[in-house]
Image: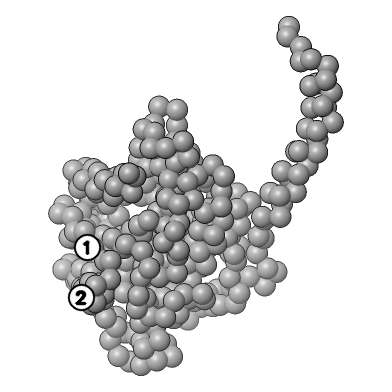
Amino acid sequence: MAYLPIGISTLLFFLLPGWLGLSLARAQAECRPPPPEVARLVEIRPGFHRVTGPLAEFDPCHHSVQLSMPGFFADKLADNPPLMIIAHGGNGPGLAEQEMVRRMNARGVATLLFDAFEMNGFRYHGTSLFLTGATNESRQRMIFKATLGAYHWARLHPRIDGSRLFIHGLSNGGSVALNMAAVVDPAHVRVVVAEGAPSAGIGMPDQVRVPLLVVFGKIDNYGGKTEDDWMYTRADLCALNQQAEQAAPGTTQRCSRTYNPAAQMITPQQWGEQLKAEGQPVEFWFYDDAAHGLLGGPIHRGMRIYGSGPTAVRRYGWTGASPDAANRFTADLMRRIRATYP
């Protein structure tokens, strides 16, 4: 059995408890538990809700937070890997988000995934509470606040490259990603990826500060009234919009529950094309053989029921993509990440 020299072992005996105590104190100082009167649900029609009240901050100590590093056999991009912050969709972290974690980690990219709804005190897993029972703006406001906090926390984390952060959001998380592109610092965030973002929710910003990739499956009709009611060309009533706390100025200042509620909002494609015409760094990526959530498994041509009782509405909800489309999306994403290295 090997022994440390007496001087070193004695030094460790005295210093280690203090070091552990300092680390524990620092970790505890980062914790952001929700306030006592955190978000609550208000039913606005049978089976359908809006979230009101103060929203929770990102809490790095929350049990849902997964900071996943590339494994030993993963591709190595740098000693400190880049980080992908993942803003989940309207049903919380699911198959598509976990598949993004797996694919990014295998290719040398760390990931940060968390559950914004659970941080706000909601126990909803196994229910349709948020998938089909809450407004887009309610879900997006919770996800946006948590994602903004995650960005501020992650850019200072010692195990990742704080100058190479990437943000990906799917569905309601895609709308959050659009808005994150307007508030992050280009010194930290290289690219934001907004996948399957609906027009309804917290709106879309007037300006973005970093390159923004707007991604859609060509047969994404999620939430559509007809089979060809594509997400990227859909426009709902302004009354469905509400601005998120700390979001940059955008469409909700002209189109929301407060401003012009009876008017029709702009579509995601129209919005993106306007920003491109102004010279802003926006690109569209469209994928054949893909619906809503390119990493969500094979294409499933299902339907969704929103609400309950006589006011319930039935909507299209095609999800997933062909393996080829999912792989092309992953390869395209990795090309953009690798391009940030000299």
Residue 302 appears in the picture as rendered: no
Tell me where residue 46 appears, x and y as whole percent: 45, 77
**Pointer 1 residue:** 284
Tell me where residue 216 appears, x and y as whole percent: 24, 60
Q: Residue at x 16, y 68 (%)?
A: 228
**Compared to 322, does 151 lie above or below?**
below
Left or right: where 199 falls relative to 137: left
Local crowd at mark 2 within 10 Å, few (<14), some, or many (≥20)? few
Q: Residue at x 39, y 83 (%)?
A: 252
Residue 308 in which image quadrant:
bottom left
Tell me where residue 119 appears, x and y as whole percent: 58, 60
Left or right: where 178 falls relative to 41: left
Viewer-proximal residue among 289 and 9: 9
Q: Residue at x 66, y 55 (%)?
A: 30
**Pointer 2 residue:** 277
Q: In what quadrant of the picture does the C terminus appear?
A: top left
Q: Residue furthest top?
A: 1
Residue 19 in which image quadrant:
top right
